[in-house]
Image (cartoon, rainbow, N blue to C red):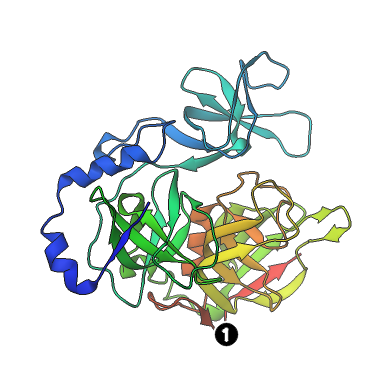
Amino acid sequence: MKIEAINRRDFLKYSALFSASAWMAGSRASSKFALSRPSEANANKLGRVLFDDVVVYDQPSQDSPVQKTLMFNDLVEYSSQQTVNNGYPHQDMWCRLSDSSYTLYKNLQPVENQLSEPVLDIPTSGQLAEVCVPFTTAVVDEWNQNQREKEDQMFFYGSTHWIYGLGKDEAGIYYYQVREDRWDDSYYVNATHMRLIADNELTPTSTAVDQTEKVIRINLEEQYLVAYENEQPIFISALSSGQLTGDADLTTPQGNFEVNYKRPSRHMVHTDRISINDNELYGVPWVSYFTDSGIAFHGTYWHNDFNQPNSHGCINLPIPAARWIYRWTQPVVPPREKKYVSNSGTRVEVF
């Protein structure tokens, strides 16, 4: 598929052509689940299946009869969650699906399905955006003469990306031009599948508090963190720290650190893959580094198995928690900055 880039000078011409019919582009994203406008959102929660061969049971027990199996990127509705004491150190949380069957919550990424109206005036300096549908295809920019040989990629709900331009295909569907930050590869993504993040959404929080009295304490044994202001706990989140796997020691280092480097989006690559889908991660959101070796807090869309080690050393967090950490901690990142370094960040204690 060829997508023709649109120059900024063409903005007014094309903006006059935009109509509500562009919403229909969303139905092309997945044959497995029909996308909807925000006003048509389903009452039930929506989950994206994270792996192939995820088993669905009759009851919230792996000893109950098997109803069916789900595959990677299948989408399911679920109405409730319940925790089952299975006799292991970490209890299992189960989801009750819309057909009254059950599957383990850790096998689903909680997602939303909110198409966004395309914005046709994109700053040349770039605009941060997040994927607002369960998943979407990022089409290789065939017009980029400097593009390395790459295949189309899949971007997932909650991942963040920098947009630098606009395109339109033969059918008149608008696409944002995404340029990934590791190798500067260029892709086009259906514009209704990404929501632009306004500057005011990135304003820092708890600014009236003495910033030296903020600290995040990470409990590796129990796999949770607590944020404190003046030694009063104000935020808690489950996490996944680094794991010891085979001959590779990927455990998170213990000690006292400071947040010293932030990126709202990062293309991460792991040569020592520890999961079937974590070797190349596009648009990892809300990255707050606290060691010089690259250990960071960040959002996680490729697994939902928190409360136990499951990472390459970083502190994997649910995406809302990573965003909270990003905004609450020092240093404060200006909204349009791709990365920001400081030697006076919020304290982090890992034990």
Residue 28 location (% of width, % of height): 35, 39
Q: Nearer the viewer, residue 51 or 40?
A: 51
Residue 138 location (% of width, % of height): 44, 54
Residue 257 location (% of width, % of height): 69, 76
Furthest residue toward right = 247
**Counting other residues with Cα less than 10 Å from the Cα at mark 1, is it few (<14), some (14-19), or many (20 or more)?**
some
The residue tagged 1 is: 344
Q: Secondary structure at mark 1?
A: loop
In this rendering, the answer to whether 275 lies above or below 326 is above
Which quadrant of the view contains residue 92?
top right
Left or right: residue 127 versus residue 332 is left
Q: Nearer the viewer, residue 320 or 167?
A: 167
Residue drawn at 59 percent across, 79 percent down: 260
Q: Amino acid at mark 1?
A: Ser
Residue drawn at 63 percent across, 22 percent down: 60
In this rendering, the answer to whether 102 lies above or below 215 is above
Which quadrant of the view contains residue 335?
bottom left
Residue 45 location (% of width, % of height): 43, 34
